[in-house]
Amino acid sequence: MILAYYGYGYYYFDPTYIFLIIGAAICMIASARVNSTYNKYSNYRSMSGLTGAQAAERILRSQGITDVQIRHIRGNLTDNYNPANKVLSLSDATYASDSVAAVGVAAHECGHAIQHAKGYAPISIRSALVPFANWGSRLSWILIIAGLFIGGNSSQMIIDLGIWAFSLAVLFQLVTLPVEFNASSRAMQILESTGILGTQELQYTRKVLSAAAMTYVAAAASSILQLLRLIVLFGGGRRRDD
C-alpha cells in the first residue's frame, strides 16, 4: 500500500501515485524502443560510407552554414546542438559511425542548427524558456513543501506558486515537441535531396528518428501527469490546516 502525508495530520492511501507510475512506464517504454531501434539500424552501414560527423558537415555546408562547430562528446545518444555557442556535439555512437542510424541522428541535430540559422520561432522560444524551466523544476517542490509547513493564510499562495513554477517545466516540454519533430522532418528532406542516404536507407532512418521523437512525447506526457498530480493534491485550496 502506498501511503503519503498531505497536511491532514495523518497518513492515507494516495491514489495519485498512479500518475507517476503511468508517466514512468511511458518513459521506460519509449526509452526501450529508441534504444532497440537504434541498435538494430546501427548495424546497417550507409552506402555513402559517410560517418555521422562527415554527414553533418556535408548537410551544414549544403545549407550554407559555415559557423557551426562539429565536435565529439562521450556517451551514447547524448547528441545535441547548442544554439548559444553554435556547437553541434555528436556522441560515441554517432560521430565516427557510418551506420544509417548514426547518419540519421547527426542529420537531426543539423536540423536544429538549420532551425537556428533560419530563425525558426519555436527553437528561439525553447531557448528562452530554458532558465525558467530549470529554476521552475528546482523551486516547485521547495515552495510546495514550504507552503505545507508554514500554514496560515499565505500557505495556499506559496503552494500555488510552486505549482506555477512546475508549469514552466511542463511548458518547456510542450514547446520542445514541434522543435524536435521539425528537426527530424528537415533531416529527412535534406538526406534525400543531398543523396546521402538511398530510398531504403531513408526508411530505416525514419524509424530511428520516429522512435527518438517518441521519447520527447513521453517526457511531455510524464510532465503533464506530474502537474496534474500536484494540482489534485495541492491546488485549488484543497489543503486545509488542522
Image: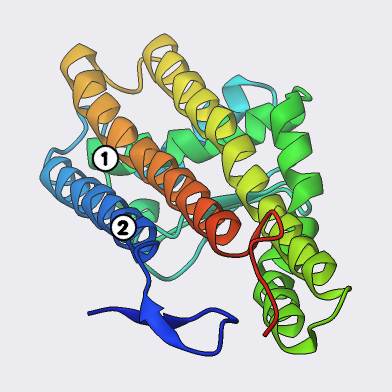
* Frontmost residue, 232 versus 117: 232
Identify the residue shown where x is 38% and y is 80%: 12
Give whichever of discs 2 and 1 has the lower sequence position. 2
Q: Position of residue 43 (x, y in %)?
A: 11, 45
Residue depicted at 64% across the width and 36% down the height: 175
Q: Secondary structure at mark 2?
A: helix
Q: Quadrant of residue 238?
A: bottom right
User: Which residue is the site of mark 1?
Assistant: 101
Tell me the crowding category of disc 1: few under 14, some 14 to 19, or many 20 or more residues within 10 angstroms, Cα based.
Answer: many
**Mark 1: amino acid:** Ala
Residue drawn at (26%, 40%) of the image: 101
How many residues crowd around disc 2 within 10 Å: few (fewer than 14), some, or many (20 or more)? many
Q: Are marks 2 and 1 in contact (CB under 8 Å)?
A: yes
Pinpoint residue 45: horizontal percent, then vertical percent.
Answer: 16, 38
Can residue 158 be spotted in the picture?
Answer: yes
Percent coordinates x, y for residue 70 in the rendering: 58, 51
**Residue pictured at 31% horizontal, 57% vertical:** 93
Label 2 – label 1 distance at C-alpha: 9 Å
Can I make out residue 66 in this image? no
Residue type at numbered disc 2: Ala
- In the picture, the disc for residue 93 is 2
Does 133 sit above or below residue 115? below
Q: Position of residue 36 (x, y in %)?
A: 15, 50
On screen, residue 65 versus residue 33, left or right, reads right
Q: Secondary structure at mark 1?
A: helix
Vertical placement of residue 114 versus 158, above or below = above
